[in-house]
Amino acid sequence: MASTPPPTIRQGSLGDRVAHELRARIIRGEIPAGTHLVEDTLAAEFDVSRGPIRDALRALDTEGLVRSQRRGVLVPGFSIGDVRELYSVRGAIEELSVRQAVEAGPDWADAAAEVDTMRRAAAAGDQHLFARADLAFHTEIYQGCRNRPPGGTVET
């Protein structure tokens, strides 16, 4: 195991926070298709017990980002059809979320800062920074609508 510190993860239950980080890594391609995820290894990496890891993997399985198999959990690949379907659902959820967020009237300073970060990342060709800022921007929208977060469907 590398000597890097555990990743910083945000508010929410421990399982939710681990799921958020794993989801982001899968989406960014840091955990590629075909990777076998091992509970003990993840627990050590995140410095948590296996319970939150199981919760996170269950959530990601429900979202279709991992598949539980007889002997563990695998990160599947995605077809063009899978991606089209995910973005279709994401578009509908985002439209509703933006409408509700505007009605709720949250402070948009954090979302605007993420847009600035995306612009800088695009200009620099930094795909990973752009993806992180994009995810943070959309999270601001979902939090602004004051509904329960839509889970990984939107983050994929």
Image: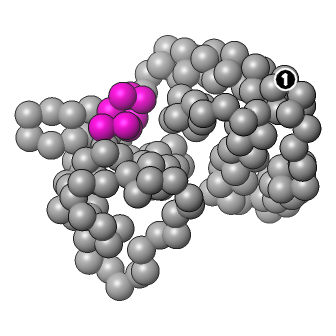
Specify how the rendered protein is coloured.
Answer: one colour
Residue 60 in the image: x percent, y percent? 38, 37
Work out whether 17 lies above or below 44. Answer: above
Q: Is residue 135 visible?
A: yes
| Disc 1 residue crowd, few under 14, some 14–19, many 20+, Cα 10 Å | few
Work out whether 2 lies above or below 104. Answer: below
Question: Residue extending furthest bottom?
Answer: 3
Question: Residue extending furthest left?
Answer: 70
Work out whether 41 lies above or below 22. Answer: below
SS category of the residue bearing label 1: helix
Image quadrant where residue 105 sits = top right
| Residue at numbered disc 1 | 99
Write the residue at 75% across / 46% down.
Answer: 140
Q: Is residue 31 visible?
A: no
Residue 112 in the image: x percent, y percent? 89, 52
- Side of 13 relative to 108 (left or right): left
Image quadrant where residue 57 sits = top left
Residue 42 in the image: x percent, y percent? 28, 61
Residue 23 in the image: x percent, y percent? 46, 46
Write the residue at 65% across / 54% down.
Answer: 132
- Side of 42 relative to 19 (left or right): left
Of 122 and 70, the residue lying toward us? 70
Label count reads: 1
Query: Label 1 amino acid?
Result: Arg
Write the residue at 24% across / 64% down.
Answer: 49
Quadrant of the snapshot with the C terminus: top right
- Side of 87 relative to 120 (left or right): left
Residue numbers of the magenta segment: 58-65
